[in-house]
Amino acid sequence: MTETVTRIEYTLPVNDPVAEDQVQLSRDDLWTGLVAKAADPRPYVPAITECTVLSETPQGLVREIARDGHRFREVVVFDIGHRVSFRRSDEKEVWTIDNVIDEDPTGALTLTFSGEFGREFAASRLAALRTSMAETAARTLAVIRESAAA
């Protein structure tokens, strides 16, 4: 028996070379921002209304969040300087969402958000998830850029 898995992915460039007035982010800026997002996602993901870090190590943390009226626990794993993985596995849902710092073929920084879900979605829900992922990735960059400018 094969497990059903749905995957989605969204990649965006980190710095716009023609936006001269825009703060240019480094890999370190991105990493610092993604770690901050793991500890307190509320500025990055407005749908998350509460977050409590239950335990923390250099390799990650365990947190409980409230989103859309539901509370659940996530294990957050750090691949230092490269990836932050958010994992939920309980009786209601199984998923992994990765935030990955990478480079395109020209060496320019990229940020990729990807999700792997342990179920299928109706086409309309899948489209909404893709839109939400793109919006969250863009908002994440904006919040990190604001913090780097401060």
Image (tube, helix red, strand yellow):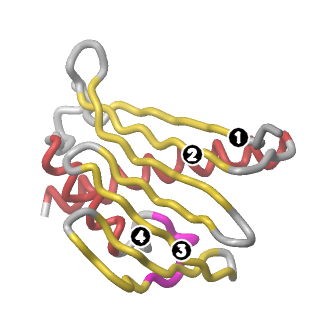
Q: Which residue is label 1 attached to?
A: 6
Q: Give the range drawn in magenta.
A: 45-51
Figure quadrant of the C terminus? bottom left
Residue type at numbered disc 2? Gly
Quadrant of residue 60 within the rendered picture: bottom left
Picture coordinates of residue 26 (x, y %)?
14, 41
Q: Which of marks 2 and 3 is in front?
A: 2
- The crowd level at tag 4 (other Cα within 10 Å; few <14, some 14-19, many 20+) is some
Which of pointers 2 and 4 indicates the residue nearer the eye?
Answer: 2
Residue designated by label 2: 115
Looking at the image, is mark 2 or mark 4 earlier in the sequence? 4
- Look at the numbered disc 1 and give the secondary structure of its residue: strand
Kindly indicate whether the residue at mark 4 contacts the one at mark 3 (C-beta within 8 angstroms): yes
Q: Is residue 46 magenta?
A: yes
- C-alpha distance separating marks 3 and 1: 22 Å
**Residue type, mark 3 in image:** Ile
Q: Which structural element holds mark 2?
A: strand
Foreground of the two, 50 or 138 = 50
- Which residue is tagged 3? 48
Q: Which residue is drawn at 26% across and 43% down?
A: 82
**Which residue lies at the image location 38% right of the left edge and 85% below the top edge?**
54
Query: Mark 2 or mark 3: which comes first in sequence?
Result: 3
Alpha carbon distance from label 3 to label 4: 7 Å
